[in-house]
Amino acid sequence: MTIERPMFPPRREIETVEPFAIQDAFCTALVRIERIGTCRRLVFSVPDDSAPESPQRLVTAKLILPAEALASIAAQLFQDAPAEAARDAATVARHRALAN
């Protein structure tokens, strides 16, 4: 008696499409991470230099992601460019020290 296994087609990667133009948003800082149930809202900003006497940050983008997606995103960023990520982390730490 021979047992035959069904032949499944190989798994394909999920195609990513952009059905309409989505505007890019330039950001220089992650301002805060807010909890929304099992998701997180990441709020990004740029500095507003229009009034030097009262510095402000302008929010340019808000992303809502499942919390478990953040670990995957962080891993992808560090895997992509570990030296750049370390340098960027040092830059962020330096800016935070100057802001406080």
Image: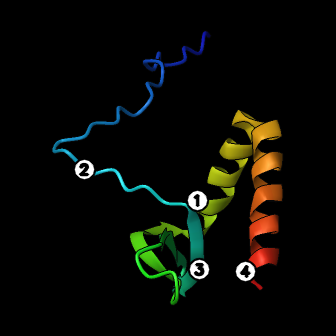
Instruction: Answer with mark 4 or mark 1, whichever residue precedes in sequence.
Output: 1
Tag 4 secondary structure:
helix
Q: Position of residue 8 (x, y in %)?
A: 45, 20
Query: According to the image, label 3 marks what residue?
Result: 32
Instruction: Answer with mark 1 or mark 3, whichever residue precedes in sequence.
Output: 3
Q: Distance of mark 1 from mark 2, alpha carbons? A: 21 Å
Q: Residues within 10 Å of mark 4 (few under 14, many from 20)?
A: few
Query: According to the image, label 1 marks what residue?
Result: 69
Q: Position of residue 18 (x, y in %)?
A: 25, 40
Which circle, 4 or 2, is nearer the viewer? Answer: 4
Q: Give me the residue at 75% from left, 51% from top.
A: 88
Confirm or deny contact between disc 2 and disc 3 (CB under 8 A). no
Q: Give me the residue at 60% from left, 10% from top.
A: 2
Q: Give me the residue at 83% from left, 57% from top.
A: 90
Q: Give me the residue at 42% from left, 18% from top.
A: 9
Instruction: Answer with mark 4 or mark 2, whichever residue precedes in sequence.
Output: 2
Quadrant including the N terminus: top right
Confirm or deny contact between disc 4 and disc 1 (CB under 8 A). no
Q: Which amino acid does label 3 sit on?
A: Arg
Q: What residue type is labelled 2?
A: Ile
Q: In which quarter of the image is residue 15?
A: top left
| Towards the viewer: 57 or 22 | 57
Tag 3 secondary structure:
strand
